[in-house]
Amino acid sequence: MITLEPGLTSQLSPRVRRIIAPNPGVMTGPGTNTYLLGNEAIAVVDPGPDEPSHIDAILREGAGRIRWILVTHTHEDHSPAATPLARATGAELRGVAAPDDFYQDLIFRPDVDLAVQPLLQTPEFSLRAVHTPGHACNHYCLLLEEEGMLFTGDHIMNGSTVVIIPPSGDMKDYLDSLEKLKALALRSLAPGHGELMPEPMAVVDGIIRHRLNREAKVAQVLAVAGGTLDELVERAYDDVPRVMFPMARYSLWAHLLKLAREGRAVESGGRWEPPG
């Protein structure tokens, strides 16, 4: 049975179960998705926030069989439960330590660095880490090779656009990482927030198109008149609710940094202008 209720287990495939953390919100949707892979020996993907009721739900479902804990990245809604869960189970932590940046879980320290050892093989499944910087520099998607299911963390979300927060977040890296996914044999996307997504390539192409359309709008409003981030977000994101402007401001910054690297924008004293 598939449920959107936090704390309850949904069976998504013979190898994969999901528990949703009780942290719904504008940026997290129904809550952070925690995935459990395998039956005899279990890998937990993105254990979520350090919320006792959620950790208890993972432990109940794991029933003494949790051997590995993997995090796609170290934002505070994805990895903080990893350390107490590892303490409770003795499981091995896999991921990449956080940069000293916004919204990061600086406590997380992996036993195995995904950059060094990207493949986890068990008698039941093979899970391969794919470096996908953009949302964060230490972001990895995880490919369940037997099912073509990609655990996307915050690289791709269901129902909303991913926020890119510089300096760890990088718009060019994000677009390049989306292109990288096209080389993988994918059958579904398992996002960090929201429901499973079929037709992965259509989803990836749609996100790339959306981002490039937004970039074109940023360049257009910049050509009309320069301004500060606060001034430009009013014009470049006039199609989104104002309540989203604080987060949109970060992605605007990321777009402008990309345009600057391409010689299409300049910044001085907090104001952005077209070149020339």
Image (cartoon, rainbow, N blue to C red):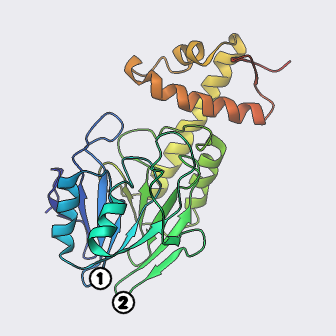
Quarter of the image containing the N terminus?
A: bottom left
Residue sitting at x 39%, y 39% = 160
Q: Mark 2–mark 1 contact, CB under 8 Å?
A: yes
Amino acid type, label 2: Pro
Taking the image as shown, residue 237 lies to the left or right of residue 49, namely right
Q: Secondary structure at mark 1?
A: loop
Q: Secondary structure at mark 2?
A: loop
Q: Which residue is mark 2?
A: 123
Is 74 located above or below residue 272 in the figure? below
Is 11 located above or below residue 28 in the figure? below
195 or 128: which is nearer to us?
A: 128
**Residue 207, how many percent across, how many down?**
50, 44
Q: Which residue is mark 1?
A: 41
**Residue 211, how many percent across, how many down?**
56, 37
| Residues packed near mark 1 inside 10 Å, few (<14), some (14 to 19) or many (20 plus) | some
Identity of the residue furthest to the right in this view: 276
Picture mark count: 2
Residue sitting at x 49%, y 37% = 163
**Residue 8, how many percent across, how many down?**
14, 58
Q: Compute the Cα span from label 2 to label 1.
A: 9 Å
Residue sitting at x 20%, y 68% = 59
Is 59 located above or below residue 201 in the figure? below
* Disc 2 versus disc 1: nearer the observer: 1
Amino acid type, label 1: Ala
183 or 73: which is nearer to us?
A: 73
Taking the image as shown, residue 193 lies to the left or right of residue 55, namely right
